[in-house]
Image: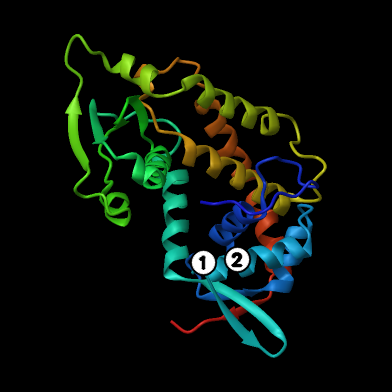
């Protein structure tokens, strides 16, 4: 997901308006045939120090990108989800609640992607590398990327027009190559661990984020922080990571706080949000 403008008043460096907006939509609009008024969204986001201008700009930009639909009723503007936005939010929900942060079910297989593009297609090469990284791949050696398990990159290859330039294979490590060596050669495990430690520094404390006014604000920031973490995590096999891998504790903290915030956050959102029912 791309991010919107930052907001200096935000208590977390990761809490940018569009990231927060996607968390908000996933929690309070997904699976419901409603649109929400811009004014009520502005009121919710004010709790996080996000300005009215930033909220309106984010809503407008997301509508232009085909993520939101506009609906008018009187002088009010309401925003609902497009099918594209629904797919993005459902993917985020799967990553949070189904995939999770710990890969304990790895079967020993790897997806291997190889490609070679000339300098005349440098921009496309950059896009492909970015998309592979986002999909959980790591660079093993020049032009050769790997990811644990089975990854479908058909959409990426097709969208970039690279069907004749990319080779995709399923593989298993054979001696003298060890899977543990692949993990540490292709992925920066130290950087991944540091991101989880940063999350724990923010949230694994008594009464985290005390500067925020209520549990609705804390819930939105928590989900935003966590989704950004798991989206950037290549989901490496747990058997090849240290037993004290920080993602284990971080996931426990996320789930505990989610339960703690849910009831009050839901009630606050219900009191604030101005909703417009949409036709099936």
> Element type at marker 2?
helix
Q: Mark 2 points at which residue?
A: 61
Q: Can residue 265 be seen in this view?
A: yes
Q: Name the residue under label 1.
A: 65
Q: Can residue 271 be seen in this view?
A: no
Q: In this view, does 217 lie to the left or right of 200?
A: right
> For residue 237, what is the image quadrant?
top left
State the image coordinates of residue 49 (x, y, percent, origin top left): 79, 53
Q: Alpha-carbon neighbours of circle 1 within 10 Å: few (<14), some, or many (≥20)?
A: few
Of 43 and 145, which appears nearest the observer?
145
Residue at position x 47%, y 42% from top?
Answer: 231
Of 120 and 25, which appears nearest the observer?
120
Q: Is residue 21 left or right of residue 42?
A: left
- Badge 2 vs badge 1, beta-carbon distance below 8 Å: yes
> Element type at marker 1?
loop
State the image coordinates of residue 245 (x, y, percent, origin top left): 49, 20
Query: What is the number of the mark on residue 110?
Result: none
As drawn, 200 above or below 122? above
Residue at position x 26%, y 36% from top?
Answer: 116
> For residue 28, what is the image quadrant?
bottom right
State the image coordinates of residue 53 (x, y, percent, origin top left): 76, 64
């Amino acid at each position: 997901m791309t991010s919107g403008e930052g907001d200096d008043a935000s208590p977390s460096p990761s809490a940018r308006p569009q990231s927060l907006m996607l968390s908000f939509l996933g929690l309070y609009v997904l699976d419901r045939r409603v649109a929400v008024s811009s004014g009520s969204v502005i009121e919710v986001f004010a709790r996080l120090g996000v300005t009215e201008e930033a909220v309106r700009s984010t809503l407008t930009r997301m509508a232009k990108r085909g993520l939101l639909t506009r609906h008018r009723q009187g002088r009010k503007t309401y925003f609902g989800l497009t099918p594209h936005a629904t797919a993005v939010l459902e993917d985020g929900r799967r990553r949070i609640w189904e995939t999770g942060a710990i890969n304990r079910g790895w079967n020993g297989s790897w997806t291997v992607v190889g490609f070679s593009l000339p300098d005349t297609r440098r921009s496309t090469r950059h896009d492909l590398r970015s998309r592979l990284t986002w999909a959980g791949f790591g660079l093993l050696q020049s032009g050769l990327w790997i990811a644990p398990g089975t990854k479908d990159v058909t959409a990426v290859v097709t969208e970039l027009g690279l069907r004749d330039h990319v080779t995709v294979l399923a593989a298993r490590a054979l001696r003298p190559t060890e899977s543990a060596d692949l993990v540490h050669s292709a992925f920066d495990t130290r950087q991944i661990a540091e991101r989880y430690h940063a999350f724990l520094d923010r949230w694994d404390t008594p009464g985290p984020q005390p500067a925020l006014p209520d549990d609705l604000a804390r819930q939105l920031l928590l989900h935003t922080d966590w989704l950004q973490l798991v989206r950037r995590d290549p989901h490496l096999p747990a058997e090849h990571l240290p037993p004290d891998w920080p993602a284990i504790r971080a996931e426990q903290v996320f789930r505990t706080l989610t339960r703690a915030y849910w009831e009050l956050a839901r009630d606050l959102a219900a009191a604030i949000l101005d909703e417009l029912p949409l036709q099936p």
